[in-house]
């Protein structure tokens, strides 16, 4: 019997918010979330979302290069080109959302074009923890 002050429990397939559902995400779930938001350049992306996407992206790229080496000559790179083009926009979008999560504009992505120093600075921004305050891109992602 339920007390009037406590709400009834939710069924297992329902949660009280998006963040509760994300607690049970696996690496493929994070990757699929990024693919569903492949052209969403607004909002925020937490570290887990960004780095799991990057890990799967590297895995798919290596797999494509291996398949190219086995099936085609090393010069063709057909599978690599398909994977690289297919993941370009989702990768750019999740990187920009990750920068938003650390309270930086997405334009900071362009700093990576400065040799060495730019890539290191961008990496520092991407590794930082989520900014706990609500910023112009929304509430914290976690």
Image (tube, grey):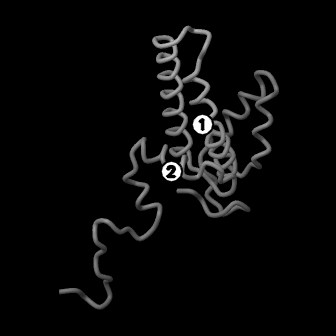
Q: Quadrant of residue 16?
A: bottom left
Residue lying farthest to the left in this orientation = 1
Q: Nearer the viewer, residue 16 or 40?
A: 40
Residue drawn at 39 percent across, 45 percent down: 26
Q: Which residue is mark 2?
A: 33
* Vertical comparison of 78 with 28: above or below: above
* Nearer to us in this view, 8 or 94: 94
Q: Residue furthest bottom?
A: 4
Q: List the single residue furthest toward the right.
A: 114
Please name the residue shown 80% across and 28% down the image: 113
Name the residue carrying label 1: 86
Sequence order check, earlier mark of 1 and 2: 2
Q: Position of residue 135 (x, y in %)?
A: 70, 61
Badge 1: few (under 14), some or many (20 or more) residues near its Cα, within 10 Å? Answer: few
Q: In the drawing, does residue 48 fall left or right of residue 91?
A: left
For the residues labelled 1 and 2, say whether their Cβ atoms are less than 8 Å apart.
no
Residue 63, above or below 46: above
Does 72 sit above or below residue 122? above
Q: Nearer the viewer, residue 74 or 106?
A: 74
Q: Position of residue 37 (x, y in %)?
A: 58, 52
Q: Residue 122 location, x and y as percent?
A: 71, 34
């Amino acid at each position: 019997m339920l007390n009037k002050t406590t709400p009834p429990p939710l069924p297992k397939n329902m949660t009280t918010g998006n963040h509760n559902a994300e607690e049970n995400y696996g690496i493929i779930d994070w990757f699929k979330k990024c693919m569903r938001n492949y052209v969403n350049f607004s909002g925020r992306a937490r570290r887990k979302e960004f780095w799991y996407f990057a890990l799967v992206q590297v895995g798919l790229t290596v797999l494509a290069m291996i398949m190219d080496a086995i099936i085609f000559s090393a010069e063709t790179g057909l599978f690599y080109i398909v994977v690289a083009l297919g993941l370009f926009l989702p990768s750019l979008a999740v990187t920009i959302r990750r920068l938003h999560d650390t309270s930086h504009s997405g334009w900071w992505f362009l700093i990576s074009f400065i040799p060495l120093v730019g890539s290191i600075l961008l990496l520092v921004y991407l590794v930082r923890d989520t900014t706990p305050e609500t910023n112009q891109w929304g509430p914290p992602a976690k």
